[in-house]
Amino acid sequence: MTVGVDMGVTGAAGARAMLDLEELLATRLLVQGNSGSGKSHLLRRLLEQSAPWVQQVVIDPEGDFVTLAEKFGHVVVDAERGESDLQRIAARVRQHRISVVLNLEGLDAEQQMRAAAAFLGGLFDADRECWYPVLVVVDEAQLFAPAVAGEVSDESRKVSLGAMTNLMCRGRKRGLAGVIATQRLAKLAKNVAAEASNFLMGRTFLDIDMMRAADLLGMERRQAEAFRDLERGHFIALGPALSRRPVPVRIGEVETQARSTSPKLTPLPDQPTEDARNLLFSAPTAEERERPAPARRPNAPPPPSTNDLLAQLVRDRPTAAAPEEESAEGAQEREAGLAAVMREILADPDAAFRSVAVLYQDFLVRCRIRRVAGRPVDLAEFKRRLAVARAGVDRETALTPEWDAALAAAADLPEDIQGVYLLFARAALAGAPCPGDGEIARICGSRSPGRARRLVQYMEQRGYIVCRADLRGARIVALPDLGRETKPGDQNAPAPGEDARGEAGLFTAG
C-alpha cells in the first residue's frame, strides 16, 4: 500500500508536494537549514501528516514537540532518568508500538548525548519480533553526531555517534527510518549524513554548507547561491520519496504549535525611572527567598595548546635519581654472579655454535633468574665477557697485569677475532702449547678447521700475531704487543672433547 504524506505545495503551479511514506521508511531523510529557516515546522508537518500511518519516535533536545501528545497521543518520556531505564522504556516502545517524544530539555549537552544514545540503543537492540516500522525523528542532529570533538568528553561523543550511526546505517533492516535535521551540514558527521537518500534543503548562508547542499542535490556550484534566497518554510526537495529532480517545496500549515515561538516585537512598558529602580533593587520577596538558586554547570576550560602540554611534560618529568655507589662487596657479588651465568652458558656443548644474539638473550634471562644485582649487561660488554670466557683463562692469570695488557690489546681488534687473540694470549701467558685449528674454530662458532686457518692467516697479515713452525712442524704463535709466544702445538689438533674428525667423542665426559 502506497501512503502519500502531504508536505505542502510545489512549483509555480501549486501542485501538492506528496512524500511517499513507504519509500521514506526505506531511504531515510536529511533536513538542513539555518536557524529560523523552518526545520522544526517541516518536521512537525511530517509528524502530524504521518501520525495515523506509522509509529513515531522523536528525539527532542528543546522540548518543542511535546505538544504532539495533546492531539496525536504521543507519550512524553522525560530523559531525566537512568540510562538503563531509558533502554528498558525504548524496548517497550517497540514492543507495544507506542509513539513517544523523548524530552531532553533541561539536560546539558553531555547528558543529552548519553540519554539519546541509551534510548536509540534500546530501539536498535529490540527483539526481532518487534521490528515494526518506526519513524525516528532527531532534531538538531549535529548535537548527537558531531563531526569534530567539542567540549563534551570523548566517551560521550563516541557513544552518541555510534548510536546515530547505527540508526542511519543499520537501522533500516530493524524497521528504523531515520529523519535527521541539522542547522549546519559541516557540523554533522559525514558517515551519518551520507546514509540519507532524501533531502530537504532550506535557507543557508555559509559557503561551505551551501556547497555541500548543492553537492548532495546534484546541483552545479553556481546554483548554490539559490539557498540564500529561500524564504522561511521553503525548501528544495530531492530523493526517491520526494522527487527525482530538485524541486522547490513550500511547507503547509500545522495543527499544533511549539512551546517556543519566534520572538515578536512588543512595546516597552511605560515605567517611570524611580519605579524601575525600586523594582530592581528592592529587598527580596518571600517567594524569591524560597526559590532555590539554579544550579549552573561551570564552563569547561579551553583545551591547552601544544606548547603548554609540552611545557607541562617537561615540568612533570621525574628527575633521575643519582645512582647509588655500589659497595665493594656488592660489586664482587655481581661479578661472581655474571661469571657463574657465563660458565653455565658455555657448559652447553652447543653454545659455541650459537649466534651471539641468541647467547646474549640467554645470558639476560639467566641473570634475571639468578637475580644478579646492578644494571643489565649491554651487548658490547657481553661480547667482551664472552671472548674472555671462551679463551678459558683461569682466575689467577686473569688478575695479573699481563692479562690486563692482553685485554687492552684485544679491545682495539675487530670483535670477531678478539676471542681468538685472547685464546693465543692465554696460552702464551700460561706457557701452554699453541691451540689447534679445531679449538680456534670452536671459539669462532664453527666446526670448520679451514675457517680457523684463514682467520689465523688474516691476523698474521694484519700484524696482530706472528706464526712460525719448529723443526717438527708444530705451530708457534707470538704476540708482539705482549712480548710473549706460545709453546709449539699441533695445528691439526681437534678441539678438546672432539675426535680427529671434529665430532664429539662417544665416551666424552659431560
Image (cartoon, helix red, strand yellow):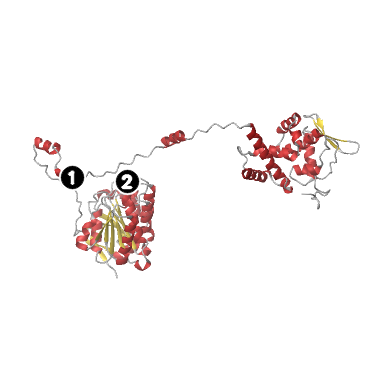
Instruction: Give the residue type at disc 1.
Output: Glu
In the image, is residue 507 above or below residue 338?
below
Q: Work out which residue is located at the far right of the displayed protein and give it.
A: 471
The residue lying toward the viewer, choosing from 5 and 308, is 308
Report the residue marked by disc 1: 290
- Rendering coords of residue 104 (x, y %): 28, 53
Within 10 Å of the Cα at label 1, are there few (<14), some (14-19), or many (20+) other Cα atoms? few
Describe residue 32's horizontal placement relative to residue 479 as left or right: left
Visible in this render: residue 215?
yes
Q: Residue 464 or 54: which is nearer the viewer? A: 464
The disc placed on residue 207 is 2
User: What amino acid is at disc 2?
Assistant: Asp
Q: Residue at x 80, y 36 (%)?
A: 427
The percent position of residue 490, horizontal first and vertical second, equals 85, 41
Relative to 428, say whether 121 is above or below.
Answer: below
Per the model, the C-alpha gap separating discs 1 and 2 is 50 Å
504 or 147, nearer to the observer: 504
Mark toward the start of the polypeptide (1 vs 2): 2
Q: Is residue 220 visible?
A: no
Residue 475: name its quadrant.
Answer: top right
> How many numbered marks appear?
2
